[in-house]
Image (tube, rainbow, N blue to C red):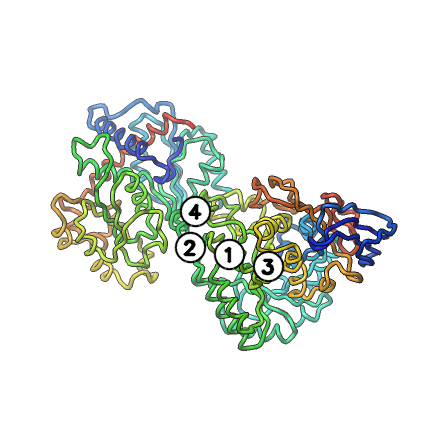
Amino acid sequence: MTILIRGAAVLGGKTADILIDGDTIREVGSTTPAADRVIDAHGLIALPGLVDLHSHLREPGGEGAETILSGSRAAAAGGFTAVHAMANTNPVADTAELVELVAERGRHAGFVQVRPIGAVTRDLAGEQLADIGGMAHSAVAVTVFSDDGRCVGDSLLMRRALEYVATFGGVIAQHAQDPQLTIDAVVNEGNVSSELGLRGWPSVAEESIIARDVLLAEYVSARLHICHVSTAGSVDVIRWAKKRGISVTAEVTPHHLLLTDERALAYDPVYKVNPPLRKADDVEELRRAVADGTIDIVATDHAPHASSTKDCTWHDASFGMVGLESALSVVQHTLVDAGHIGWADVARIMSVTPAEIGRVDGYASPLTVGSPANITLVDPATSEIWSASRLHGGSTNSPYVGMTLPGRVMSTIFRGTETVIDGALVAPELLRNE
Amino acid sequence: MKHLISTRELTTDNAIAILDTAIDMVDVRSRDVKKLPTLRGKTVANVFFEDSTRTRLSFEAAALALSADVTTFTSQGSSVSKGESLKDTLQTLEAMGADFIVLRHSHSGVAATVANNGWVDAHIINAGDGTHEHPTQALLDAFTMRSRLRGDAARGMDLAGVSVVIVGDVLHSRVARSNALLLRTLGANVTLAAPRTLLPREIDGWGATIVSTLDEAIEMQPDVVITLRVQKERMTSGFFPSESEFSEIWGMNDSRLRRLPSTSIVMHPGPMNRGLEISGSVADSPQSTVTEQVANGVALRMAVLYTLMGDSR
């Protein structure tokens, strides 16, 4: 099977034709050979398939909110060809058996590559290390370990975890949140928390953990990744650490690049997320930090929740928002259209670098001959009001419904197979791998 | 105005109109026949997920004085603390015919969520939500200040130029929050006196002056000192070292009362910790308005029910 993508602006630059043969990119240029199928991509931008380092696919245990299949479909609709599945499932992904199960179900669904993230501590309890070596040496060779949802708060345990994971060449993705400083915290601490009478989540609770952990990473010569950076102060600390040569990478979510804590003023739980939405100054600094490379990647922190835990009071609601389908549009809006970065940078922060951090093969040289055919075609010129019809996962807790956002993923190709055609997901039965 | 959720949403005119209506309700309550037929055939549901006998009785008395039927639902059980059950509980009460839901809950924002989400059509009155707001308490406090300070000329007046000190646990106090916002709307000058541990870190929107000790606030010769209740759980969780130190620096006592102008008043939303945030002799002094506040509470809540009744938008 050959597919010819005709006339796409490669990484937003020069127009070219891309010939896919099987699961590999065979030609990139102006030749227009015959192909079994031709995609007219004039006016579209060709990006490498996007890679998410931070998704919650909820399976096993949370199938009422999302399954590996439904989350994979949401990912493909958003232009992703690989996602990392966070470990906070039920049971927790803290053993080789569990991570192999998750990867196998992802392979079976067939929409994206599902890369399991292993827990740092057993049952995410923050007490003893999970089966890190077992997961690293499993069939799926886990390289990213995280207790995300919870912080590895104990300093000694964090030191040991960094050392132990480094033994296997992996990385710890830390959810930076000082547990004591954030007891019962549900919204950013500031004027908004004062007005709402809600327990504030202070920026220093994130920044102090990042400061501690970059120093620990330096001390034990380990690799560290910081999940969902949300404050300007965190950016300062990471900038300092990188300048010092510490091996740290950082991610920001689309929602922290766009939304501020004032969204919480009506107590609408769709805006309840952890870390919380911050202030306009933080949002501006996070955008600048992506532009100057202090923040390496955008990761979705896609966190589906059933309506019963969102159609309720702020206190009772779960933390989190879905983000796979909307990520590229929010990045275009907040970073590209706002003049911070170009499309080649989008490829870097949403595909090349997240794949590098997660050690996912096939993404190092985007859209080049011989690379695996993971390709996303986006129409940057459209702009529309977001509605729930744009969501394809198991849950609808998107903060963007009703907002106008640019861009639309018209085509996603995963290892030479189209998962999105003309802006529509293909049916699951067409992709299922038995 | 269909609901009363927060004093923030009250305009100056709205607030003054409610206070003026409360004057009429005080008159009603001083008559032989202490009832109005306004809410005949209507049902007021008092829904209290957090115990508060005083507030509940006050709303009950107000509803009965307007000839409403009153149903009461109280629960502190964890089985109804989940959001879905809250929604179910309120829809059940409405299905039984509640036209007004007076809602008290230990979590901030519950009244706003109920009013905003279209779970029910009834008028929602926030009778205290967590550490957020307690708007009827602020209105009755404003009513009490205006009556004391303006006397017979009170009707139609705001509180322009009145200086009010709020002292104590501002951080966790829904009374402080509602009062600060309403007093600002009514033109009063608000000063907060508290240790930094009991103040929100940022309160740009309150327009309040902040001082460290009650003595500093007394030097400003305020017209009103509102003392806040110190919750028992604060005493053991590191917000201040001891009750005696708190009382020493932020307690309203005789010596501080003597340094106030004789026309100044001392208020407390109750229930009081005598000897902690307010001394017994100050609480019982002629400058204290504690029992007056309770009496005014019924009239003010009648005024709120009456006002909301007239507007179903």
Q: Chain of mark 4?
A: B
Q: Quadrant of residue A342?
A: bottom right
Q: Secondary structure at mark 4?
A: loop
Circle 2 packing at 10 Å, graded few (<14), some (14-19), many (20+), is many
Quarter of the image with the C terminus of chain A is: bottom right
Q: How many marks?
A: 4
Q: Position of residue A50 (x, y in %)?
A: 68, 56
For the residues bearing labels 3 and 4, Cβ distance under 8 angstroms: no
Which residue lies at the image location 84% right of the left edge and 56% below the top edge? A21
Give the labeled residue for mark 3. Answer: A88
Distance between the Cα atoms at labels 4 and 2? 29 Å
Q: Residues within 10 Å of mark 4 (few under 14, many from 20)?
A: few
Secondary structure found at label 3: loop
Q: Give the Cα distance between marks 1 and 4.
A: 30 Å
Host chain of mark 1: A
Residue nearest the observer in this picture, A118 or B313:
B313
Q: Is residue A422 visible?
A: yes
